[in-house]
Image: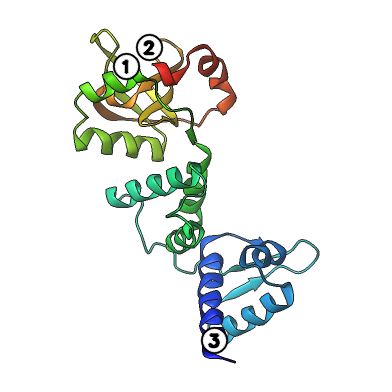
């Protein structure tokens, strides 16, 4: 094997290891397709990794998958770290925006990051991608009001991120278009980008209905003890149609 081919093989083994560490169970067909190799080549690579001591399990039968032993690597990283929360949300945002010039290796990055979380933590992280949506660019009027407003404190943004990831209710002080402030009790279900302005698609307990909140108009945020179950995105379709967020 030439030096170039050997390097490519080592890179593929590293990528395969990251994939196995990041998921519960994937079929050999799915993994082979992601690595752009045949299933026969994949089985040879799996054999090499097993010889190196990686505890790979296989489910027999049609549609069976391969995975690492469930207790491998549990608890290496903590979701409680604010840096980790910000990184995970940023990664989910990048994935939601689709392929970009500088994110060609985003799948590899995600696999390596996910490798250090427990199965329960991984499930919560997997949900992030479905809760972040990219829309149209903000209108000139929105851009003018956005640039004229001061951004929130770092503590406020961190609180919003933490509540969003852990499905915690929030008590916020919200400043509307007329600069009037109200106290609101909300559930932050989805993030929506009307570039460069971010919005929360939320359930508002004051109005007992879905509402859209501009991120930069949230002046203060405190996490409440109550948790919530994420509502289907369809629950917000009516308000998204009625109110063009790019003009809010």
Q: Position of residue 190 (x, y in %)?
A: 46, 31
SS at badge 2? loop
- Asked if the residue at tag 3 contacts the one at tag 2, i.e. Cβ–Cβ closer than 8 Å, the answer is no
Q: Name the outermost residue toward the right.
A: 62
Q: Quadrant of residue 41?
A: bottom right
Residue 52 appears in the rendering: no
Rendering coords of residue 115 (x, y %): 46, 63
Q: Is residue 149 left or right of residue 26?
A: left
**Quadrant into which the N terminus falls:** bottom right
Circle 3 packing at 10 Å, graded few (<14), some (14-19), many (20+), is: few
SS at badge 3: helix
Q: Residues within 10 Å of mark 1 (few under 14, many from 20)?
A: some
Q: Are marks 3 and 1 in contact (CB under 8 Å)?
A: no
Which of the pair 193/168 is nearer the observer? 193
| Residue 237 x, y percent position in the rendering | 57, 20
Q: Which residue is mark 3?
A: 6
Picture quarter with the C terminus: top left
According to the picture, the residue beneath numbered tag 2 turns out to be: 206
Residue 184 badge: 1
Disc 2, disc 1: CB below 8 Å?
yes
**Could you classify mark 2 by the number of other residues whose Cα lies within 10 Å: few (under 14), some (14-19), or many (20 or more)?**
few
Which is in the foreground here, disc 2 or disc 3?
Answer: 3
Q: Which residue reaches farthest bottom?
A: 1
């Amino acid at each position: 094997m030439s030096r170039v081919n050997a390097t490519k093989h080592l890179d593929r083994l590293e990528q395969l290891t990251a994939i196995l560490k990041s998921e519960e169970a994937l079929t050999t067909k799915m993994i082979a397709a992601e690595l752009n190799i045949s299933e026969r080549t994949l089985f040879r690579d799996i054999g090499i990794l097993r010889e190196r001591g990686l505890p790979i399990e296989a489910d027999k039968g049609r549609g069976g998958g391969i995975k690492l032993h469930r207790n491998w690597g549990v608890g290496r990283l903590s979701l409680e770290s604010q840096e980790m929360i910000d990184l995970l949300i940023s990664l989910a945002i990048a994935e939601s925006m689709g392929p970009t010039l500088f994110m060609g290796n985003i799948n590899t990055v995600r696999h390596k990051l996910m490798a250090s979380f427990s199965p329960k933590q991984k499930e919560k992280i997997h949900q992030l991608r479905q809760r972040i949506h990219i829309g149209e660019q903000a209108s000139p009027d929105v851009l003018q009001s956005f640039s004229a407003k001061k951004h929130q404190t770092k503590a406020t943004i961190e609180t919003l991120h933490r509540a969003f990831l852990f499905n915690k209710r929030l008590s916020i002080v919200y400043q509307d278009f007329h600069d009037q402030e109200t106290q609101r009790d909300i559930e932050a279900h989805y993030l929506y980008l009307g570039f460069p302005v971010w919005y929360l698609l939320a359930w508002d307990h004051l109005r007992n209905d879905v509402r859209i909140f501009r991120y930069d108009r949230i002046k203060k945020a405190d996490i409440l003890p109550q948790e919530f179950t994420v509502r289907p995105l369809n629950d917000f379709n009516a308000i998204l149609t009625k109110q063009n967020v790019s003009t809010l």
